[in-house]
Image: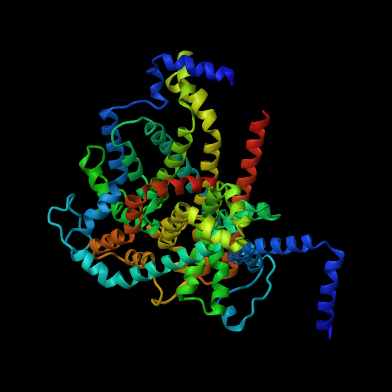
Amino acid sequence: MATAMTTTTTTATTPTTSASSVGRGRGGWGSTAVAVLLVSVMLFPVYWMLNVSLQPGGGGAVASPWLPLHPDVSGYAKALRDQGPHLLTSLVVSLGSVVVSLVLATPAAYALAQFRLRFTDAFLLGILVSQMVPGIVVANALYGVYSDLGLLNSLPGLVLADSSAGIPFAVLVLRAFMATVPGEVVEAARVDGAGELRTFWSVVVPMSRNALVTAGLFTFLFTWSDFLFALTLTTTDDVRPVTLGLYQYIGSYVQDWSAVMATAVLASLPAVVLLLVAQKYVAAGATAGALK
Amino acid sequence: MNALETPVGGRTAPAHRPPLRTGRRAQHLGRVLFVAPAALYMLAFYGYPLVKNLVMGFQEYTTRTFFTGEAPWVGLANYEQVMGSPIFGKSLVNTLLFTAGSILGQFTIGLALAVFFRRTFPGAGMLRSLLLLPWLIPLIVSGAVWKWILDQDNGALNRVLRATPLTDARPGWLTSTTLALAAVVMVNIWIGIPFNATILYGGLQDIPDELYEAAALDGATGWRAFRHITWPLLRPVVNVVLVLGVVYTLKVLDIILGLTKGGPANATQTLATQAYQLSFVEFDFGQGAATGNLLIVVSLLFALLYLRLSRQRAEG
């Protein structure tokens, strides 16, 4: 410890410019220019999606102009006409999945974080194993049960299956946060006569607001992006999310790429909103995802 | 009449045990109830499918099963048919190539970006979060966009290529049996870069600046500082990123179905797409289950290999 402190004091007085190439260097506008270039290359497909979506549609699969100089919303009109109901289905299923995931995951995360339960390790191991299970394996087994229970082509069926991504994630994010809630806070609530449930509901849940938002946002995004369960657990047009609508669009020969790309833009909106509105939550979620 | 005896037994019980213990037991039960719903869900949506797939792998489980309820036992016939088919070898090799290629690309580019973004410069935060976009948009959306970019006749990539003096050819990225797998890997690399960059960036942020400053005094900068400070200290984060990357990449399905549906001529067929194909296109759920189980075996083999390697490294 003493050595480390000495080192720190020494370096504090020594100007260190050479470390910057690997350490936290201080780059200027030159670095910004390089970064803008890198991000532009990475985001070209996103630009292309937007550009093509604004081109006049209906002309078959011709080469799209490089710039949307004459923006045209006919692609969006067609997309909303064809895919409007699917977008609505996606929204309903995603919101449903957020509710189911948070209702199941929040109390579990609290118990796993604050109580010393015998099966805590087993539960966490289960979450770890669940990450290795391919979705197609789950879908393969669920199809039979869903068929027996009449859950194929149903909103509850899709909500439940789609929550399989949100629940383990939410448990991890919420548990990581709730482990930082001091035991004294929980204890104090109990001394004041609050029962287990009251303590949880009126003390721990309000304190965990940020973690709940993070878990909820990501669950929404997971479900909104789901394609596999929609593909396997629905067979008719009754309950069809936009991801599946898009898949059908590109499954056959594409006549109108601007409508396809308009749908793609609409299907990307939640991700964009998430990024703009909730940057800090996204970073928190990405880090928590790594702890999986 | 048993019902009468139970309350009696129940009433006598506290006499043997201190009341505190009964209270604790009730408390424990109450606490278990917090976890029970989530635990039951996990058992139903992960535990049950795992067991059910193992069973289905030994059954003739087809559309008929849904009408008659019969799924005759067939022993190892599903596995024999699946592994005996010429598509299996191709799918297995494709799965390994797809995973290895994706991880290699995502990780190296992600790490390079993470190291670059460690600098502080105007707009760094905003540019860094923009970089997350490919990871956040639905996979099938990325599939649709790239399908148009990689289009042989009018795709943006071939138009750019033809504008350069490099080539006059129009490669059929998604339609040529020799190029399709590479194209799908490229798209998957694009999707995976943000995740790798973000997690590795987080790991880099945790390395104290003082270490670099001290190393610089000893003359270790640039590549040497990376080798002797960054890499060893980043190791745990690198492990997490690689393991998660492999586990997630092995089961990728959306992006391949969106781009090529496993074609042309099975050039991009993997174990995951093959399992889908068998179950939900050919409606042979038994063979689909067998293929899915083999995919899990590949995952487990990797996990074991990884554990073994990391233990060797820790010892040696």
| Lateral position of residue A214 relative to residue B71, left or right | left
| Lateral position of residue B131 relative to residue A132, left or right | left
Quarter of the rendering containing residue B49: bottom right
Residue at 51% of width from left, 45% of height from top? A290
Residue at 37% of width from left, 34% of height from top? B117
Residue A241 seen: no
Location of the N terminus of chain A (image quadrant): top right
A118 or A262: which is nearer to us? A118
A73 or B300: which is nearer to us? A73
On screen, B76 above or below B252? below
- Count of numbered badges drawn on the protein: 0
Residue A167 seen: yes
On screen, A19 above or below A99? above
Residue A40 image offset from top left, x and y in percent:
28, 42
Residue B114 image offset from top left, x and y in percent:
41, 35
Residue B269 image offset from top left, x and y in percent:
47, 56
Toward the left, the furthest residue is: A70
Residue A143 image offset from top left, x and y in percent:
54, 72
Residue at 53% of width from left, 16% of height from top? A6
Quarter of the rendering containing residue B68: bottom right
Toward the bottom, the furthest residue is: B1
| Lateral position of residue A260 relative to residue A89, left or right | left
| Lateral position of residue B71 relative to residue B199, left or right | right
A38 or A107: which is nearer to us? A107
Toward the front, the furthest residue is: A192
Chosen colour scheme: rainbow
On screen, A33 above or below A133? above
